[in-house]
Amino acid sequence: MPHPLDADAVRAWCALALDALGGAREEIDAINVYPVADGDTGTNLYLTVESAARAVDAVFDAHATTGPGSRPGLAEAVRAMAHGALIGARGNSGTILAQLLRGMAEVLAATGGGQEAGDDATLLRRALRRAVESAYEGVARPVEGTVLSVATAAAEAAEVTPGDGPAVARAAYEGALTALAATPCQLEVLGRAGVVDAGGKGLVEVLGALVAALTGGPGAARSTAAPAHAAHDWLAGGCPAEAGGPDVPAGDGPAFEVIYLLEADDAAVARLRARLDALGESLVVVGGDGLWNVHVHVDDAGAAVEAGIDAGRPYRVRITHFGAAATERTRVHEPVQRAVVAVVPGEGLAALCAEAGATVVTVRPGEPPASGELVQAVRRANAREVVLLPNDADLRHTAAAAAEQARAEGVRVALIPTRSPVQGIAALAVHEPGRRFDEDVVAMTSAAGATRHAELVVAERQSWTMAGVCQAGDVLGLIDGDVAVIGAELAATAETVLDRMLAAGGEMVTLVLGADVPEAVADRLQRHVRGGHLAVDTVVYRGGQHAARLIIGVE
């Protein structure tokens, strides 16, 4: 049954696209030969759409808290989708997809906020056309035979198709499907490899999900999607004589991929484009309104980051060395029987958990990991059985989604819902790979559950808490997730927190120091425990985390 192009359709589109890319991810990764054969296009697209889906879900969740029946409008939903894709975009194709979604959002938001909207079919045609225009604006040196060609074909097919919104969406999907099959004739490197363009195939999956969202059906396009490997007509008959695009070599290119988010004005970004274009290739700069996602392949990664610093404020910087990544992908690893995957918020904690044998996902400040990152860590662990420790209450749904996907790939996964890194440390301490899996999980769960946890953070603003009203700059002591103490100084507040936690008994105190906390604080707290709580041992780690000045565990 046809569904109107509204906020619910946007949410369904994101969910269906994520499901489709999850199913096609490995296939898309396997055909990734352009611009660099780094085998991660499917994964990058999945992570990009996952970020978009999370942003849309957050908007719906926010409305749900305001009262029954409150729902976002189309404009709010598509803006959230575009923003989520922008801040979560990965790789060349993910960055371009984020810009395609941003272009669509420009049209849909302008007409979905109370202005005269027109019919869904007209809106969709205009949105797809604007998507293509904005994508070409973001790519420094467009190449045909890529996702750009597939997007163009989708928009052109939509423009000449009569009918309602679902009919226009299906025409766009079918136009993209036809264009995808032609990409090996447009880009010689694809023809030599016998594959279609990986980014283009990902876009076909996303457009197929749009069809399903607007028709109200399941993943309508999955069964008819073009094969990724070249087992179709062009291989048998060859490319038309007038076809045959540029012979783009698949050989050595720049050594590094550099990606970062950038806060900067338009004039600074224009200068940055010129500077990065001279430094490297595969330059894509997308975004607007002061926030940009920058992607470039260069030999001098430092110079690319410095250019961003000169332009504004770069953050979430990711630098990937292509050679190292390729070596890791081609190395043959013998699967192990069991592994532990632990999420931690600081480099010190990461080193500690890695030393204990865990595969680590290090959380960057203000950037919680997506479920795709956790699934990648499970794959990287290369084990038949995996114990997953999220170490954060806010990651429980993300970790559950990752565990479910890993199970679908044949890995036996046990999720222990650890709420703090100190619970993860306790679980790792009793981990024994030689035990039966179920017995090991029970022991680790018991150790984590027997560990009370606390955090000391600095309040950013005045607010009501369970311990009273706090002011900006106050030190908050959270015990098991709830504010229990408000203080003015870190060490003194921590002493009060420790006394409250140890009042119920305890044998071991774990102190995890934040990035800027001096050793003197740990020394003072150790003396406090020795003086007031006999027979309680204390261990100190420098965690390096930023959000919490101090993490405390009591076993």
Image (cartoon, helix red, strand yellow):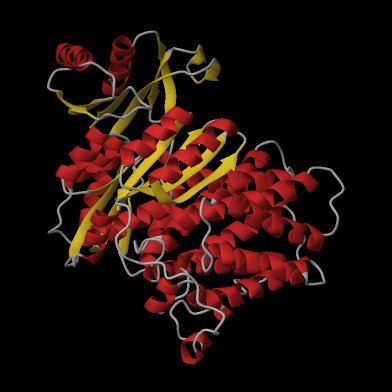
Residue toward you, 327 or 164: 327
**Which quadrant: the N terminus?**
bottom right
Can residue 532 be seen by looking at this rendering?
no
Residue 309 visible in the current orientation: yes
Above or below residue 55? Residue 375 is below
Q: How many numbered marks have been drawn onto this rendered protein structure?
A: 0
Q: What x and y, as percent, mark residue 313?
A: 46, 29
Query: Is residue 162 rendered to the left or right of residue 299?
Result: right
Q: Residue at x 38, y 78 (%)?
A: 192
x, y percent for residue 461: 52, 17
Tell me what residue is drawn at x 69 percent, y 54 percent.
130
Residue at left offset 32%, top offset 37%: 302
| Residue under the image location 30 percent in, 57 percent down | 378
Give the x, y percent position of residue 453.
Answer: 32, 30
- In this picture, residue 509 sits left or right of residue 299: left
In the visual, does 246 lie left or right of 410?
right
Viewport quadrant of the C terminus: top left
Location of residue 455 by image quarter = top left
